[in-house]
Image: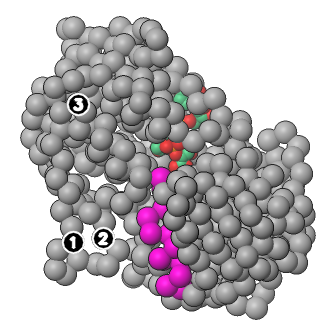
Amino acid sequence: MDRIRIVGGNKLNGTIPISGAKNAALPLMIASLLTDETLILDNVPRLADVAQLQRILGNHGLDIMAAGKRPGDHEYQGQTLHISAANIIDTTAPYELVSKMRASFWVIAPLLARMKEAKVSLPGGCAIGTRPVDLLIMALEKLGAELQIDGGYVIAKAPGGLVGAEIDFPKVTVSGTHVALMAATLAKGTTVITNAACEPEIVDVADCLNKMGAKVSGAGTTRIVIEGVKKLHGARHTVLPDRIETGTYAMAVAMTGGDVQLAGARPELLQSALDVLTEAGATITPNNEGIRVARNGAGISPVKVTTAPFPGFPTDLQAQLMALMACAKGSSHITETIFENRFMHVQELARFGARISLDGETAIIDGIAKLKGAPVMATDLRASVSLVIAALAAEGETTVNRVYHLDRGFERLEEKLSACGATIERISG
Ligand SMILES: CC(=O)N[C@H]1[C@@H](OP(=O)(O)OP(=O)(O)OC[C@H]2O[C@@H](n3ccc(=O)[nH]c3=O)[C@H](O)[C@@H]2O)O[C@H](CO)[C@@H](O)[C@@H]1O
Ligand SMILES: C=C(OP(=O)(O)O)C(=O)O
């Protein structure tokens, strides 16, 4: 199993190219199931989750062609995928494939909408809470599908096709919103989703669906209206930049000090996180090429932050902020409201000497002057990268084990950080 070795203490200086967003690329790839024409996706990140979804879509019979860079493309542009679901040969998504990744469950929506049936294993994904799918099932039932759970699979049928409906989510859910949105594009009549998730990845998917001939309005607000159409067609769409990767590297720079240009980043996708970083003492300067992050001289100030759905502070940046606050001059409070078990990094950060105590859903972090390198274990995707951030600033050497979590969501992490002066290498095997 691969490990990452980091010797801390170097400031980060230079440019980090920001990749396409994992959490947009995955539902965009899934949306290709809605049409028998080719969907072309540009700027798809090279990640383990993307490769796994390619296998899942391949199992349904999709043809996927990956093209590399073209002359004139930016250094940070990802791969281009040409995905054709002309023939769906299998409407089952098996346990072996789906259990590795949460978003793969979402294939249930386009399969049901286009093929009128689907059998999909209950999902896996990061172990950060119970992560039920009751609201996804509720949404599909509202659209007229019959669903039952049998042998770990959700078996869904809509023999007469899906029918537009009013779907009011009792809590904000990104997965529920993606599923309802995709399914409703081919339903008969109008669907209104209320208390919809407003995440930029939902907007990106809605934009792509509209290019494919769907009639979606209101994405990015809490009320999305979808007029169902009979058929969708092919389109070409560019995946938006990854706001979580952006925030992660911004926190790494705030942690080590230095001056880094996050090329291709879009500040409006993570304003709440940028505001927190400014409060913590970083200098954030949006410019034409992305976002410049610097911290020179001044120490890290403590903050009080509560995670919330977009536009609030993202839960996917909570672990990284905690690593940063481990070196703040004072006591910080971080409250996690989205996932009930997303503090697995606390015990690993403690190996660096971090002083963190938990009080229900709040972590209290008493900053110390210097962390010390240690062998640590990655437990989930964002927890893993919080250990990398801690290691970059820690005195001495750190080994991060179970790196496969990182590979799910961070493209060329070692390369991007070492180009900015970090001492970081992957040890294979
Ligand atoms: C692939 C992807 O895009 N993953 C993101 C997505 O996860 P995901 O889409 O799984 O997250 P949701 O927004 O659906 O979950 C939010 C909350 O709702 C609960 N819930 C959800 C569905 C349901 O049927 N019942 C239910 O109770 C969840 O357990 C959680 O407590 O949004 C999360 C919140 O921004 C991010 O942390 C994940 O990185
Ligand atoms: C929790 C995450 O991913 P997933 O929903 O795929 O587990 C994440 O991207 O931080």
Mark 1 residue crowding within 10 angstroms, few (<14) / some (14–19) / many (20+): some
Residue at position x 63%, y 72% in the image: 5
Disc 3 versus disc 2: distance between alpha carbons?
Answer: 28 Å
Of residues 268 and 176, the one nearer the viewer is 176
Q: Identify the image quadrant of residue 71.
A: bottom left
Q: Looking at numbered disc 1 in the image, what kind of residue is underneath it?
A: Lys
Which residue in the protein does label 2 denote?
A: 77
Is residue 175 toward the left or the right of residue 312 in the image? left
What SS does tag 3 mark?
loop
Which of the pair 325/282 is nearer the observer? 325
Q: Position of 154 compared to 261: left or right?
A: left
Q: Which amino acid does label 3 sit on?
A: His
Circle on res. 69: 1
Q: Number of callouts in the render?
A: 3
**Element under disc 2:** loop
Question: Magenta stretch: residue 98 in it?
Answer: no
Q: In this view, does 175 lie above or below 47?
A: above
- Position of 211 with respect to 321 (left or right) is left
Q: Upstream in the sequence, badge 1 or badge 3?
A: 3
Magenta stretch in the rendered image: 408-420
Q: Mark 3 points at which residue?
A: 60
Q: Do the residues labelled 2 and 1 touch (CB within 8 Å)?
A: yes
Tell me how far mark 1 sits from mark 3, CA to CA.
Answer: 27 Å
- Which amino acid, mark 2? Gln
User: For this view, does 310 lie left or right of residue 136?
Assistant: right
